[in-house]
Image (cartoon, rainbow, N blue to C red):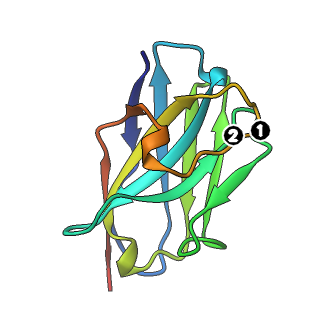
């Protein structure tokens, strides 16, 4: 079992930046591939970004490529999502997710691949 706690959400204007953090506890963090998802009101939860166990492989949704960056600090059991040039359409609840991965270089992009989830943090971008 692993517990995930997101932080860093808030209300910002379009064009601003936010950095989300997800702190993991309960199991060895290096064993987990990590992902970020988001869910806007009235929409299904969607993949935003993922990072492999060894940090070598990252993946991004087309809608955030070039604006968002994902990283992890295994010493601090934390994964980060740096969000720049935010747009109103980025408004959503952002969720951190984790999965145990045998392949250290694999990034999962499907919601069904992640058994562990945080409670979410709200990001609101005003125009």
Name the residue that disc number 2 marks. Answer: 52
Disc 1 from disc 2: Cα separation: 5 Å
Q: Residue furthest right?
A: 56
Question: In this picture, is 27 found above or below 123?
Answer: above
> Circle 2: is it few (<14), some (14-19), or many (20+) Cα within 10 Å?
many
Name the residue that disc number 1 marks. Answer: 105
In the image shown, does 110 or 72 lie closer to the viewer?
110
- Can the viewer see residue 10? no
Q: Residue at x 57, y 57 (%)?
A: 82
- Can the viewer see residue 93? yes
Q: On the picture, is 105 further left or further right than 101? A: right
Q: Residue at x 60, y 49 (%)?
A: 50
Image x and y of residue 94, in percent: 37, 53
Q: Are marks 1 and 2 in contact (CB under 8 Å)?
A: yes
Image x and y of residue 2, in percent: 44, 20
Question: In this picture, is 69 found above or below 73?
Answer: below
Image x and y of residue 88, in percent: 35, 80
Image x and y of residue 4, in percent: 40, 29
Q: Residue at x 55, y 52 (%)?
A: 109
């Amino acid at each position: 079992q692993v517990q995930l706690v997101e932080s860093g959400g808030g209300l910002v204007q379009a064009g601003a930046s936010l950095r989300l953090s997800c702190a993991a506890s309960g199991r060895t963090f290096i064993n987990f591939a990590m992902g970020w998802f988001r869910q806007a009101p009235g929409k299904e939860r969607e993949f935003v970004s993922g990072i492999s166990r060894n940090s070598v492989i990252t993946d991004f949704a087309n809608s955030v490529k070039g604006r968002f960056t994902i990283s992890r600090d295994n010493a601090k059991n934390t994964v980060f999502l740096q969000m720049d040039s935010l747009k109103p359409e980025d408004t959503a609840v952002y969720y951190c997710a984790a999965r145990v991965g045998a392949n250290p270089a694999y990034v999962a992009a499907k919601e069904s691949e992640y058994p562990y989830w945080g409670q979410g943090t709200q990001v609101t971008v005003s125009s």
